Amino acid sequence: MAGERLLTTQKAIAEAIAQEMERDDRVFVMGEDIGAYGGIFGATDGLLAKFGPERIMDTPISEMGFIGAAVGAATEGMRPIAELMFVDFFGAAMDQIYNHMAKIHYMSGGRVKVPMVLMTAIGGSYSDAAQHSQSLYALFAHTPGIKIVIPSSPYDAKGLMIQAIRDDSPVMYFFHKGVLGLGWMTPNPRATGVVPEEPYTIPFGQADVKREGSDLTILTVALMVHRSLDAAEQLAEEGINAEVIDLRTLVPLDRETIVNSVKKTHRVVVVDEDYKSFGMSGELAAIVAEDALDYLDAPPKRLAVPDVPIPYSRPLEQYVIPTVDRIVAAARELVSG
Amino acid sequence: MGLSKETLLNLYDTMVKIRTFEERVGEMYYEGKLPAFDIAAGPIPGEMHLYSGQEAVATGVCANLQPDDPVTSTHRAHGHLIAKGEDLKKMMAEIFGKETGLSHGKGGHMHLFDPNLHFGCGGIVGGGIPQAVGAALAIKKRGEDRVAVSFFGDGAANIGAFHESLNLASIWRLPVVFVVEDNLYAISVPKSASTAVRSNAERGAAYGIPAVQVDGQDVLAVYEAAKEAIDRARRGEGPSLIEAVCYRFRGHFEGDPELYLAKGEKDKWKERDPINILGSQLKAQGLLTDAEAEAIQAKMTDLVAEAEAFARESPYPAPEEALEHLFA
């Protein structure tokens, strides 16, 4: 039945890229192992066979070089997609991302456009330890000039990727390894969902209320959306109705949906897989304080990685990355306190 | 080489134009900053890196380029942009931080952009090199005969971006020319203390890229080497590397005490002023008289004066324009 086709998030991303490449011959992809391998996380699965090595370009391990080349190709009117295999590898390319990709449009007084997508994998919970498990979206949301996109579902992954490719500004597209539906990751039923076959876009800056509730608001992104929804189901059994909001994009941020929800529920918990200090959870708490302080029945709560690197050993990792149990506990405490 | 009189005089004109612009900027830079130097004061605030002494490199390379050939440059970019054909008024206004500048005052002296001339530069050493590779990639994908050029200094040849870029350009056989302006120093550190090879041209071999060292004070030598490299790129035969050995007549930036220079070193280099070298050759060949040289100088002085007047008279941007142009 049309519109009822099921896809994993990974396949939805690859389909979005393929459809845009068919539509617009300026779009091409560069990255490590994105050709014959199809991308370590499958974001370019099947694209080499379809488009050939001129448009699906395996690069050497030269992140500064090829991300900088994507910037240069974008300023010359192409619409490159570069894949940074793990966001943790950003250090090798940070100058091109932070000082060039993000700033050229502004420094040129709006005269030079940099229409590119930098896609990258985030997230842990599979014992890949400190240098392959970080989330780090806040690091890039902090610098002006980059749009920050973090899908949590197959449907959003496709629509947000097409939107990202068509955007005339640089976009960083973060896919969480745990939401992709990869056969070699912990099974996740929410990583498969209905995805229309035809191309469609989802505007940036529109949060998605994944579940309506009246007792508290949970603000989150990526895999933590799934865990928050699981937590909300448990909380419902206890008679606590949690509203779960998937922010979907941090830049631009849907401030209105956040504030309206908190005004309704009077309580908020931020669930964040990134580091706690100076990041997304602090920013959202500040926004709530600025715009809805008088509506709060309790101080905002923050669940985030407690300012340590991501450890390897399973019990250690589970201690630092928010779990369903801890989300439930935080919500319970917030409502009863 | 048999260059036409017109081409030779254009090279001379361009070098004089750059020198005149730079020397005037150098004078104006100190307005309002003295006696106790205040970098934030005066009509031209901030750092200032001038190109005086290196004119032959930008001029000899850019004389082989078309307006739509992409160029990436450095913190010392005025010469490249003038040689590419920029309107001095818009450039000067940008340096003054005025609304009428190339970037409406958002970029300033180190961040000059002009999409019409496919020109960009920046203040991060080596930052433009991968972008020239990307521009060349775009050119190759479209099957065009344009060529991208990246100018950078000997200091940048030690940053990873240089090495990654040469490798990428070579494996993808891209139409890009890398031009190392070896002015002997990375700020104050001499090349002998920073660079493992005697000449950066030797590094081309590591990436299978044809490379040559030229006398960067001799615009005809630069022109010839650049022509060969640029023609090769336009023919689809891949990247080249040129090392042009040159010298900064005004140090790294304005206010540089130049304590690192050997006694008499700069004076010796000034005897090889690129403008005088070409001027003497033209005069010896009967292509330029003293009177004509004076007329060229007078014309460039007028052009720079017009640019200065335009910049001084132009309004500053409204403060709240700082919030514009973040996203396209």
Image: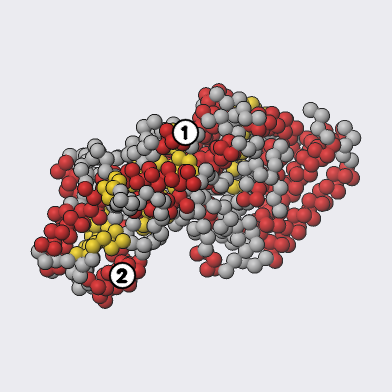
In this rendering, would A202 be left or right of A66?
left
- What residue sits 36% from the left and 41% below the top? A43
Of residues B296 and B183, the one nearer the viewer is B296
- What residue sits 44% from the left and 36% below the top? A50
- What residue sits 55% from the left and 24% below the top? B208
Vertical comparison of B304 with B132: above or below: below
Question: Badge 1: few (under 14), some or many (20 or more) residues near its Cα, within 10 Å?
Answer: few
- Tell me whether marks 1 and 2 sit on the same chain: yes
**Which residue, given by chain and number where applicable, does mark 1 sit on?**
A52
- What residue sits 72% from the left and 59% below the top? B308
User: Which chain letter matches label 1?
Assistant: A
Residue B16 placement (x, y as % from top left): 76, 45
The label number, if any, that marks residue A38 in the structure image:
none
Residue B15 placement (x, y as % from top left): 74, 43
Residue A136 placement (x, y as % from top left): 33, 49
In this rendering, would B326 be left or right of B290?
left
Vertical comparison of A160 with B143: above or below: below
How far apart in space, not on screen, are marks 1 and 2 (Cα)?
Answer: 47 Å
Q: Is residue A22 visible?
A: yes
Quarter where residue A111 is shown? bottom right
Q: Look at label 1 and name its amino acid.
A: Gly
**Which residue, given by chain and number where applicable, does mark 2 sit on?**
A259
Of residues B135 and A318, the one nearer the viewer is B135
In this view, which residue lies farthest toward the left? A238
